[in-house]
Amino acid sequence: MARDGFRRADVLPGSFIIAIGVLGTTLSGMHYIRNRHHAKVLGECRATIESLRGTKFPHRPREFPRLLAVLWLVLPILIAVAGVFVVVLAHRAHGHA
């Protein structure tokens, strides 16, 4: 066991963590794009209904600030980065530099 606590056997779990992080990042990005599409379509529907009614619906605050979407996307990226650290430290523990 190396002084940093990683062994060569930790490369495979580290690689799995990287894959989970990349998958999470991809799915989060796809979900955000799909959500924005639906919000746009429903916004157009709302505008059409308001024009037919002649009155506006009560104002609602912005549903999901863009900053939160970015932070939600950063989380799986950080998971992938953690996996990279595990793999790198496991390689160093075995004498690969």
Image (cartoon, rainbow, N blue to C red):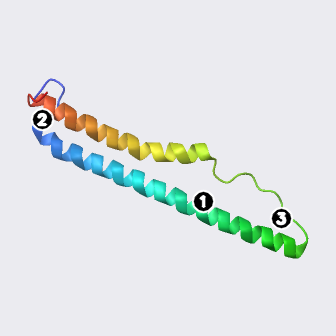
User: Residue at point 16% right, 34% down?
Assistant: 90
Q: Nearer the viewer, mark 2 or mark 3?
A: 3
Question: Dot 3 corresponds to which residue?
Answer: 57
**Quadrant in which the C terminus is drawn:** top left
Find residue 67 and report its horizontal and vertical position in percent. Answer: 59, 42
- Name the residue furthest right: 54
In the picture, which quadrant includes the N terminus? top left
Identify the residue at image location x=41%, y=51%.
25
| Residue type for callout 1 | Arg
Task: Using residue 73 as the reference point, say whether residue 68 is left or right of it.
Answer: right
Q: Which residue position holds label 2?
A: 7
**Which residue type carries mark 3?**
Phe
Mark 1 is surrounded, within 10 Å at the Cα level, by few (under 14), some (14 to 19) or many (20 or more) other residues, namely few
Label located before the other in sequence (2 or 3): 2
The part of the image, by quadrant, that contains residue 53 is bottom right
Residue at the disc numbered 1: 36
Question: Which residue lies most toward the top here?
Answer: 3
Decide: marks 3, 1 in contact (CB < 8 A)?
A: no
Q: CA distance from mark 1 to mark 2?
A: 44 Å
Which comes before the other along the chain, label 1 or label 2?
2
**How far is disc 2 from disc 3 in space, using C-alphas?**
61 Å
